[in-house]
Image (cartoon, rainbow, N blue to C red):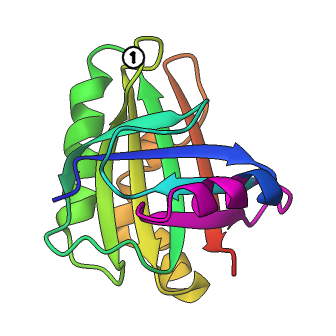
Amino acid sequence: MLTKISLTFGSRQILQSIIDKYPERHFKLMQATTHTRKLALFDLSGKDSIFESPVKLTILDSTLDANLNGMFYYQSFQVNGDRQKLLYNTLQKVITEPSDMNGGYLLTVDNKVEATTLVLLTSWENFESLTAWKESESFKSLQNFTSMGSDNSYYDEIYKTVF
């Protein structure tokens, strides 16, 4: 069972050299859809990160049949104080509710500066299924946490597989 995920960013040449150097790892090379020059390499092996500048994530919860195939939707949430528990419970509910997602993980960022950051990483077959979910009641439950404000920050990115 997967307990941690790490990712890093870089040029295709650099990321491909990492893939070639560690063929035993389960990597996914992904391209951001809004920033098409932004490439991310996800290490889904569950092993300690081999990246020089990793984003390290620990899995807190997942869907029963978590499957990271297709496109990824990466959402990062940081809230202050009392809202942290509410956010955690909301994210946990989102990944356990039935939807068309291939799989979902609730994660926390592994560094002291961002220890209160929660990440929702979901996988989707296509843009249509992701769009349908973003219009669902399940997604609407996240809307209190998806706007920037004095008590929270939010970031999201859609990644598609690089072939």
- Residue annotated with mark 1: 80
Q: Find residue 160 and report its image quarter.
A: bottom right
Q: Is residue 24 magenta?
A: yes
In the image, residue 141 lies at what x, y percent? 35, 54
Q: How many marks?
A: 1
Could you tell me which residue is drawn at 62 percent across and 65 percent down?
A: 29
Is 87 above or below relative to 90? above
Q: Determine the secondary structure under disc 1.
A: loop
Could you tell me which residue is drawn at 13 percent across and 70 percent down?
A: 64
Could you tell me which residue is drawn at 22 percent across and 47 percent down?
A: 3
Is 90 above or below relative to 12? above
8 sits left or right of 44 in the view? right
In the image, residue 52 lies at what x, y percent? 60, 31
55 sits left or right of 119 in the view? right
- Of all residues, the one furthest to the front in this rendering is 21
Is 54 above or below relative to 63? above
- In the depicted view, which residue is nearer to us: 82 or 39? 39
- In the depicted view, which residue is nearer to us: 142 or 163? 163
108 sits left or right of 74 in the view? left
In the image, residue 147 lies at what x, y percent? 58, 38
- In the depicted view, which residue is nearer to us: 146 or 75? 75
Find the magenta span and give its range.
15-38
Q: For the C terminus, give its image quadrant.
A: bottom right
Could you tell me which residue is drawn at 30 percent across and 79 percent down?
A: 99
**Hey, what amino acid is under mark 1?**
Asn
- In the depicted view, which residue is nearer to us: 152 or 39? 39
Q: For the N terminus, give its image quadrant.
A: bottom left
Q: Is residue 16 magenta?
A: yes
- Of all residues, the one furthest to the right in this rendering is 37
